[in-house]
C-alpha cells in the first residue's frame, strides 16, 4: 500500500518559502530538502557551490529548506486540499479573457526565465516561439472579448 501523504512547496517571487508535509508518518524521518539554482555571473565566488554531478563545472547557489508539518495551527495551505482542488472537474465553458491574458503573460515569462536560466541569447527559434505565444494569445483574447474580425485571422 502506498503512503498517503502530500508535499507542498509554497513559492513567492520564484523563491521557495516553505515545504509543507501533510500526513507524513510519525515514524519516518523528515526528508532533507535542498533548493538550488545555477549561479549567474553576478554571484560572488564565495557563494558559488561547485558540484561534480550534473553539467560539468556548473556553479550553483543553494540552501537547505526545513519542512514543516501541516496541522490545525499551520499558517500554510493544506497540500492535500490544493491537490483536491487541482483534481476537481473544471467547468466546460470557454476560458475568460482574463485567464487567457494571464496564460499568455505567464508563457512569455516562462520563456524569458528559461533563457535567463540557460544564460543564453535568444535564438531565431526563441523569437518565433515568442511571436507564436504573443500573437496566438492575443487572437484568443480578441475572440474571448467577442471581436468578430479575430476569427478569420486565427
Image (tube, rainbow, N blue to C red):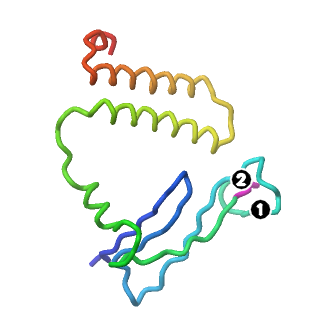
In this picture, residue 108 sits left or right of residue 141:
right
The numbered mark at residue 47 is: 1
Q: Mark 1 and 2 residues: CB-CB less than 8 Å, in contact?
A: yes
Which residue is more in the foreground, 73 or 40?
73
CA separation in Å, label 1 and label 2: 9 Å
140 vs 64: above or below: above
Q: Position of residue 50 (x, y in %)?
A: 75, 62
Q: Position of residue 148 (x, y in %)?
A: 25, 11
The numbered mark at residue 39 is: 2
Circle 2 SS class: loop
The N terminus - image quarter: bottom left
Q: Position of residue 70 (x, y in %)?
A: 38, 75
In this picture, residue 130 sits left or right of residue 7:
right
Tell me which segment is drawn in magenta.
Answer: 56-60
Circle 1 SS class: helix
Task: Check disc 1: other Cα within 10 Å, few if <14, some if 14-19, many if 20+.
Answer: few
Q: Residue at x 40, y 68 (%)?
A: 76
94 vs 17: above or below: above
Q: Residue at x 30, y 67 (%)?
A: 80
Amino acid at each position: 500500500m502506498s503512503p498517503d501523504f502530500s508535499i507542498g512547496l509554497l513559492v513567492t517571487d520564484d523563491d521557495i518559502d516553505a515545504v509543507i508535509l501533510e500526513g507524513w508518518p510519525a515514524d519516518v524521518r523528515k526528508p532533507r530538502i535542498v533548493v538550488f539554482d545555477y549561479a549567474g555571473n553576478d554571484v560572488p565566488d564565495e557563494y558559488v557551490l561547485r558540484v561534480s554531478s550534473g553539467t560539468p563545472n556548473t556553479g550553483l547557489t543553494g540552501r537547505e529548506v526545513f519542512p514543516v508539518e501541516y496541522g490545525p495551527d499551520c499558517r500554510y495551505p493544506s497540500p492535500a486540499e490544493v491537490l483536491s482542488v487541482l483534481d476537481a472537474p473544471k467547468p466546460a465553458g470557454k476560458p475568460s479573457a482574463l485567464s487567457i491574458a494571464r496564460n499568455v503573460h505567464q508563457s512569455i515569462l516562462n520563456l524569458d526565465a528559461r533563457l535567463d536560466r540557460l544564460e543564453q541569447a535568444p535564438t531565431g527559434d526563441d523569437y518565433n516561439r515568442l511571436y507564436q505565444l504573443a500573437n496566438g494569445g492575443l487572437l484568443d483574447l480578441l475572440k474571448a472579448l467577442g471581436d468578430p474580425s479575430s476569427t478569420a485571422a486565427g
